Image: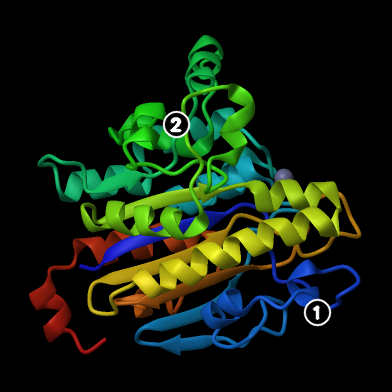
Amino acid sequence: MPHLLFVFLDGVGLGPADPDRNPLARFDLPALARLGGGHAWTDRLPVRAEPSHVVRPLDATLGVEGLPQSGTGQATLFTGINCARVAGRHFGPFPHSRTRPLLDAQSLFHHLRAAAPEEPHPAAFANAYPPRFFTYARQRNRWTVTTRCCRAAGVRLRGIEDLQRGEALAADLTGHGWAPLDLPVHPIDEAEAARRLHRLGRSHTVTLFEYFLTDKAGHSQSFERAEAVLRSLERFFTHLIACLDPAEDLLLITSDHGNLEDLSTRSHTRHPVPLIALGHGAAAFAEAADLTDVAPAIVRLAGRNPDATAADPS
Ligand SMILES: [Zn+2]
């Protein structure tokens, strides 16, 4: 089993390659192109299915009318169950009440735990949350999809101490976003964020990092904000790719719905989202077609022992 680094990008779809609407088509983004097999992340992104590099579009509409939302999209990604169908509609950004029992008992973190019940937990959630996040979430018992899944499955939520020790990432990668909170946190650059995530990944089977500024930039309809976010991701992925050992590491990138790729609208889109797997075991995602296919592929990958992989011609 490789060490899987799962970078979840909120609100990134594969849209038309129109530089007047799509920042992913307007700006030169070599690290993203490298991840895309030499192509920009647009609806022209060619499908790739190599043993160590898979690139595919995933359907994010899930056969449900309306615009995909984060609450049901993320719940689907992390459970493998079509949560838009369960909820009867696209819903978000917080979890729909009907999906909460699924997040509590059927997330990929649960399945990973069940397959490896000994300590430490095989999964990690790399994001650090400031103290006020925990205060508000506890007061209202209102958790995001990922924090709810993690709490229920015994994956520790990280906070300021983890960030200070270099054992967590700020949601914006660098920690500059923590400055207004007036907390003793020193910003880092994206290169250090990449090394941190890679280091964390080496002590877990699956390490998730969640990045939502892509969705925020999409809602802002600002090319300036979109460019800043994409340049930051460029620096991060440039260094993360450099850290990857092709014999040990697997980088997985995907999203919950489109948004950033069409700045002509303030809302989400029905475009497919990219799935990119780069590294050891990437072929596990070669058949993924929609958001329900991601979690089962991760769990299958984690359940395989190395001997079984060597004997299995697939
Ligand atoms: Zn959004």
Q: Which residue is at 73% across, 71% downward? A: 24
97 in relation to 117, above or below: above
Q: Looking at the image, which is closer to me, 211 or 238?
A: 238
Using the rendered image of the protein, determine whether residue 268 is visible from the camera's viewpoint.
no
46 displayed left or right of 65? left
Splitting the image into four quadrants, where does ligand 1 fall? top right
Task: Tell me how the rendering is colored.
Answer: rainbow
Using the rendered image of the protein, determine whether residue 142 is visible from the camera's viewpoint.
yes
Crowdedness of circle 2 by 10 Å Cα count: few (<14), some, many (20+)? many
Q: Which residue is mark 1?
A: 17
The kind of secondary structure element at disc 1 is: loop
224 displayed left or right of 253? right
Is tag 1's residue or tag 2's residue first in the polypeptide sequence? 1
Q: Which residue is mark 2?
A: 148
Inspect the image, locate mark 1, and give the three-letter code of the amino acid beneath it.
Ala
212 displayed left or right of 174? right
Number of the label disc, if any, that sits on residue 213: none
Inspect the image, locate mark 2, and give the three-letter code of the amino acid beneath it.
Arg
Q: Which residue is at 61% across, 40% downward? A: 71
Crowdedness of circle 1 by 10 Å Cα count: few (<14), some, many (20+)? many
Q: Which residue is at 50% across, 14% downward? A: 135
Of badges 1 and 2, the one in the foreground is: 1
The kind of secondary structure element at disc 2 is: helix
Looking at the rendered image, the quarter that the N terminus falls into is bottom left
104 in relation to 12, above or below: above
Q: Looking at the image, which is closer to me, 283 or 85?
A: 283
Q: Looking at the image, which is closer to me, 130 or 37?
A: 130
Give coordinates of residue 229: x percent, y percent.
68, 56
